[in-house]
């Protein structure tokens, strides 16, 4: 499986400051985890508007953090939601969920490499 994160993007936005990296990663994981749960709840409720909002937000956050694999997966989900292509939404959400888990594992491993502040 390819590396899910372009770590150079994180270095660029943090100036390679380990504390800033730690803070951004923890915020990203917490916020994105909550948004992924809301996406699943919105799917059950068939709340396409909420799914669109959450997918768009996750897409932007993923792009900012260099989480390229998640950004691509969530962009496909967002497109399907906008088109209300119901048969495609469930598998695309599952793909995005798996990409989030892979991204989270990467970031958690990366956090272990940062010096303690």
Image (cartoon, helix red, strand yellow):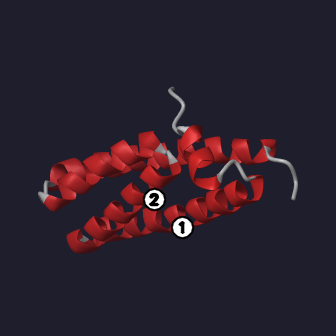
**Comes first in the chain, label 2 or label 1:** 1
Residue 43: x %, y % from top left: 29, 65
The numbered disc on residue 31 is: 1
Task: Classify mark 1: helix, strand or loop.
Answer: helix
* Furthest residue in direction front, as rendered: 15
Q: Nearer the viewer, mark 2 or mark 1?
A: 2
Judging depth in this view, the residue of 7 and 73 nearest the camera is 7
Residue at point 66% right, 51% down?
15
Residue at point 64% right, 46% down?
107
Residue 59: x %, y % from top left: 37, 55
Residue at point 63% right, 54% down?
14
Residue 20 lies in quadrant:
bottom right
Horizontally, residue 64 falls left or right of residue 11, namely left
Q: How many marks?
A: 2
Judging depth in this view, the residue of 32 and 38 nearest the camera is 32
Which residue lies under the disc numbered 2? 61
Tag 1: Cα neighbours inside 10 Å, few (<14), some, or many (≥20)?
some
Residue at point 13% right, 54% down?
85
> Quick check: marks 2 and 1 in contact, CB under 8 Å?
yes
Q: Is residue 70 above or below residue 39?
A: above
């Amino acid at each position: 499986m390819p590396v899910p994160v372009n770590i150079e993007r994180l270095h660029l936005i943090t100036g390679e400051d380990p504390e800033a990296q730690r803070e951004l990663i923890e915020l990203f994981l917490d916020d994105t985890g909550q948004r992924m749960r809301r996406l699943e709840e919105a799917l059950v409720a068939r709340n396409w508007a909420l799914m669109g909002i959450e997918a768009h937000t996750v897409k932007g956050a993923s792009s900012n953090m260099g989480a390229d694999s998640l950004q691509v997966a969530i962009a496909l989900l967002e497109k399907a939601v906008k088109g209300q292509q119901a048969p495609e939404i469930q598998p695309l959400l599952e793909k995005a969920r798996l990409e989030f888990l892979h991204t989270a594992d990467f970031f958690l491993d990366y956090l272990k490499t940062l010096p303690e502040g």
